[in-house]
């Protein structure tokens, strides 16, 4: 549930930012920071709910995948804050959110066994 909502938030924000005009910088900033913040909150909830006292795979994820998901979400959130006043904000945010989406996919896919 949390992983699905994380992906849906990222996909929706990428689509909305792509369709938004680059001159509407306040809307771009609010959408990008709120979506990245929500992903960070959801990934911190995931890592807080994980029981690492026993070795288990939870939602097809192991312990290292939770840590990598949280760290990548934190890194993208901080990167969006660092490019806040850049004149190419839209392009950078689109690329950062796509990178975050691909990173989350990469951290989750090796744990699915065929």
Image (spheres, rainbow, N blue to C red):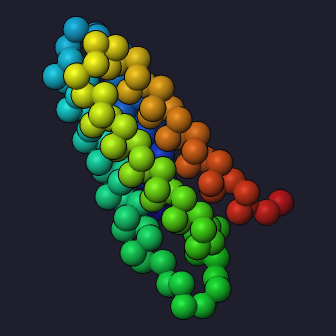
Question: Is 75 left, or right, of 61 in this rendering?
Answer: left
Is 27 drawn above or below residue 101 in the view shown? above
In the current view of this chain or complex, which residue is farthest to the left?
Answer: 26
Judging depth in this view, the residue of 93 and 20 nearest the camera is 93
Q: Which of the 4 image quarters holds residue 83?
A: top left
Closer to the camera in the image, 14 or 78 = 78
From where the camera sits, is residue 30 visible? yes
**Residue 36 in view:** no
For residue 83, above or below residue 10: above
Residue 21 in the image: x percent, y percent? 28, 10
Q: Quadrant of the N terminus?
A: bottom left
Q: Considering depth in this image, is 78 or 110 the residue closer to the camera?
A: 78
Place of residue 33 in the rendered image (x, y in percent of width and height, measured from the top left): 26, 38
Give the residue displayed 64% in from the left and 82% down from the top.
Answer: 56
Q: Examine the rendered structure and indicate whether residue 85 appears above or below residue 110.
A: above
Query: Outermost residue toward the front?
Result: 82
Q: Residue at x 48, y 78 (%)?
A: 50
Query: Which residue occupies 43% across, 68% down?
Result: 46
In the figure, 52 relative to 90: above or below? Answer: below
Of the 4 image quadrants, the one containing the C terminus is bottom right
Q: Position of residue 23 (x, y in %)?
A: 22, 8
Residue at far right of view: 114
Q: Is residue 6 left or right of residue 82?
A: right
Count of numbered marks? 0
Q: Residue furthest bottom?
A: 53
Drawn side of residue 58 relative to residue 48, left or right? right
Image-quadrant location for residue 61: bottom right
Q: Residue at x 25, y 28 (%)?
A: 84
Residue 104 lies, in percent from the top left, at 55, 49
Q: Answer with left or right where residue 19 lies relative to residue 84.
A: right
């Amino acid at each position: 549930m949390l992983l699905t909502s994380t992906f849906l938030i990222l996909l929706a924000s990428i689509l909305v930012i792509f369709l938004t005009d680059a001159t509407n910088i306040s809307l771009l900033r609010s959408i990008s920071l709120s979506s990245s913040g929500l992903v960070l909150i959801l990934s911190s909830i995931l890592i807080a709910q994980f029981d690492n006292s026993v070795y288990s795979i939870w939602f097809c994820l192991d312990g290292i995948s939770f840590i990598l998901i949280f760290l990548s979400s934190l890194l993208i959130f901080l990167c969006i804050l660092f490019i806040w006043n850049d004149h190419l904000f839209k392009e950078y945010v689109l690329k950062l959110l796509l990178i975050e989406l691909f990173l989350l996919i990469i951290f989750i896919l090796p744990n699915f066994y065929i």
